[in-house]
Amino acid sequence: MLELSRQANAESLLVFADTAAEGDKPSWRSFASERELDAFRQTRETFSIANAATIDGHIASVTLTMFSSSGDWVKFVSHCYRKDGSLALATKEFRTFYGHFALVEKAYFDSVGNTIDSTKQYRDLKTAEPIEVDKEWINETKHLAEGDVYKKGSDLPFWALLRKQ
């Protein structure tokens, strides 16, 4: 996958998390490492985590992981950015026990943010095989699966922290 190759070639891997209490206004914080974030999470949970990779001083990729306090769902959103900060590729995977499915989406963007191509597929949580999902479950979880794609690096909720790195 493009994002994995970008992370493998990254000059630095950065870790961020929204440390606000559930339901409070987001409060993003930078962590020195995954280990430091894990230590923080021993005393207080975070429900939004970001891993960012830089190449040649610019943001190359960001993976956001968001999940519910109950553990009923998790969403992974990976972004690959061009040198100019525009989004080239976004992949989203929303996994939920509501209906026992995963929604996998991939979209390619031009440099101004228009979608060039996209795919969307529902998969079984256990087998990862493509499935048809009952519309009731799609409607029930739609608000959780949508959003969280940032078409410019500067739109990321922790952009100010990235600029300090």
Image (tube, rainbow, N blue to C red):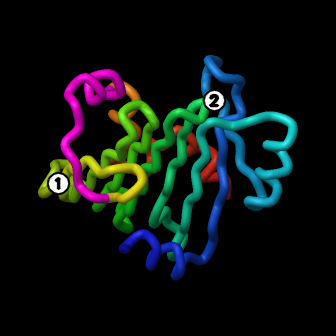
Q: What residue type is labelled 2?
A: Ser
Position of 3 with respect to 54 (left or right) is left
SS at mark 1 in the image: strand
How far across and down, in percent of the image, does residue 96 sit? 44, 38
Q: Residues within 10 Å of mark 2 (few under 14, many from 20)?
A: few
Q: Name the residue under label 1.
A: 118
Q: Name the residue under label 2.
A: 69
Q: In which quarter of the image is the N terminus?
A: bottom left
Work out whether mark 2 precedes mark 1 in sequence or the reverse, and give the earlier one. Answer: 2
Task: Give the residue furthest to the left.
Answer: 116
The range drawn in magenta is 129-142
Q: What residue type is labelled 1?
A: Ser
How far across and down, in percent of the image, does residue 92 sit? 36, 50
How far across and down, in percent of the image, does residue 56 sit? 51, 76
Q: Residue at x 35, y 43 (%)?
A: 101
Task: Give the residue furthest to the front.
Answer: 127
